[in-house]
Amino acid sequence: MSASLAHITCTALSFGWPDGTSVFDGFQLAVGPGRTGLVGLNGSGKSTLLKLIAGELTPTGGTIAVSGDIGYLPQTVVFDTWVRVDEALGIAATRTALHAIEAGDPSEEHFTAVGDDWDVEERSRAALDQLGLGHIGLDRTIGEMSGGECVLLRLAALLLARPGVLLLDEPTNNLDLHARRRLYAAVASWSGVLVVVSHDRELLERVDQIADLRDGEVRWYGGTYSAYEETLAREQEAAERMVRVAEADVQRQKRELADNRLALAKRARYGQKMSDNKREPRIVMGLRKRAAEESAGKQRVLHTERLAEAKERLDEAVEAVRDDDEVRIDLPHTRVHPGRSVLSLRDVRLRYGGGARAGGDSGAEDEAEPEATAGTKPESGAGAKAGAEPGAEAGAEARTGARLEIHGPERIALVGRNGAGKTTLLRTLAGELEPLSGEALTHVPLRFLPQRLDVLDDKLSVVENVARFAPAATNNAIRARLARFLFRGARAEQPAGTLSGGERFRASLAALLLAEPAPMLLMLDEPTNNLDMASVRRLTAALESYEGALIVASHDLPFLESIGITRWLLLDGELRDTTAEEVRETHLP
């Protein structure tokens, strides 16, 4: 089917989870050719919608009509480690038949398997090269690839299949800046229907329109994400202005109702006085009284109705204003004096592997990593320490001489390609992995938030999880602090296992920042993965209140630049200082 004819239509779509939670009820959607960025709060149903369109979930009502083949890239890409690249691309059978024919086997079954696809290997290598995977042979196994490469391999398979409809769910998660550039180019050149769920601003600047999923409905905004933000800001300003107008109207109607009641009370007192003084005949006074009561009743009803209408307009105006709750906290105990030594590295050789599943979860960026080194002068203090292990470095070429020491409240961005060792370095600093040699010394309380957010116990509530990190704090104190992280009332009682991705991240961050002793060194590994834009803003607000040293490993340059990074470190075989300009010029188009 021609790309210009492909489309997606959802009619009266309904879907709910087995526990009774409704996601969509009578949902309508129509998407034609072009690049659509699907945005919305965490938990609004973006990923669920893609799964419904892709056929991975079955709606409870309504219909989904898709014209054209569907290609779907989920958030988490998992392959068995023994699968070959050509099998992941879906061309293994065709290659086998092609090689058999080339070897002289004229069996009809081979020609049937090949069909018209005689250039399958050339097309496959071109698709891999388009995404920066030209160095990967078709006979290699997934176990030899990093998690980020697995994501690109899955995308290469989709591009090779040439579907009319392409669905991408957070495709840049765990991709380094080089890989993101390749994906941006692929998205920019797509000619069919493309729907992408992403928090990546750079990616969303390459779409034709934004679909904002909110409260089970979609609102459309033409243009890129920047244009969407500008339009949204104007809408919010107008909505807030309408709230002020509606509030003033309510107050005016209240005053008029009060004035009316006061006037009626005065009139009643005057009538009673005239009656007491018997200045008019009884029958005339009776007629006056009934007329006054009827008039008073009409006026009371009129002003009451006007007040009710004004309140209704106010409710509508308030509903039009988005909930922009922000995390507002005070963390004075995290403060680090500018001259204080926070972290020292000396001749550290990293131990790669660390239990990661090679080629499996796309979040495991440090699978099959090369060896890297980092070093500084020795310092006293607690931290990871190890001597050289016999045989551990066989065949490795050690590079030394790099020196690193962190003082005071530095804000450090740790950047590098997928597989460079960023996660391994953070885990080593956190004491989760022993280095092969050298020492990593931390001189202040440290907390580490890993990519998988596994610091929470799923069976415990948010309050109970935070209490694990601050056992001396009272329940009321914990609840008061959690309210600043937007966990108020019943929300604080939710089991961690039921939280959305954004909520789980916020709860994990709260647990670490509210821990005792307060962390003076905070390390975050790809913190913006799977966070919607509102959650990223909340994270930025929380980090503005943090007064300690910060190390953030991330491929999200706009986010890094928004949190006031003071130092950039590049891990590429060795650890060295770099600049934001160098990173952007080297890694972005």
Image (tube, rainbow, N blue to C red):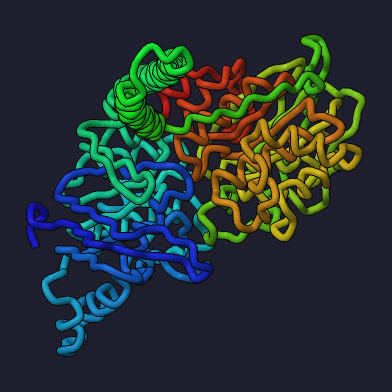
Percent position (x, y) of residue 289? 36, 25
- Report whether 577 appears left or right of 140: right
- Report whether 202 appears left or right of 149: left
Q: Is 488 located above or below residue 114 in the figure?
A: above
Quarter of the rendering occupied by the C terminus: top left
**Number of numbered tags placed on the structure image:** 0
Q: Residue at x 47, y 34 (%)?
A: 534
Q: Is 503 located above or below residue 94 in the figure?
A: above
* Front one among 195 and 409: 195
Q: Is 206 located above or below residue 468 in the figure?
A: above
* Front one among 386 and 366: 366
- Report whether 565 appears left or right of 169: right
Percent position (x, y) of residue 492? 68, 46
Q: Residue at x 65, y 34 (%)?
A: 485
Percent position (x, y) of residue 216? 35, 51
Residue 306 visible? no
* Front one among 511 and 589: 511
* Front one among 391 and 545: 545
Quarter of the rendering occupied by the N terminus: bottom left
Residue 21 visible? yes
Name the quadrant containing residue 252.
top left
Q: Residue at x 13, y 57 (%)?
A: 6
Percent position (x, y) of residue 71? 28, 61
Q: Residue at x 42, y 43 (%)?
A: 172
- Report whether 445 appears left or right of 80: right
Name the quadrant containing residue 24.
bottom left
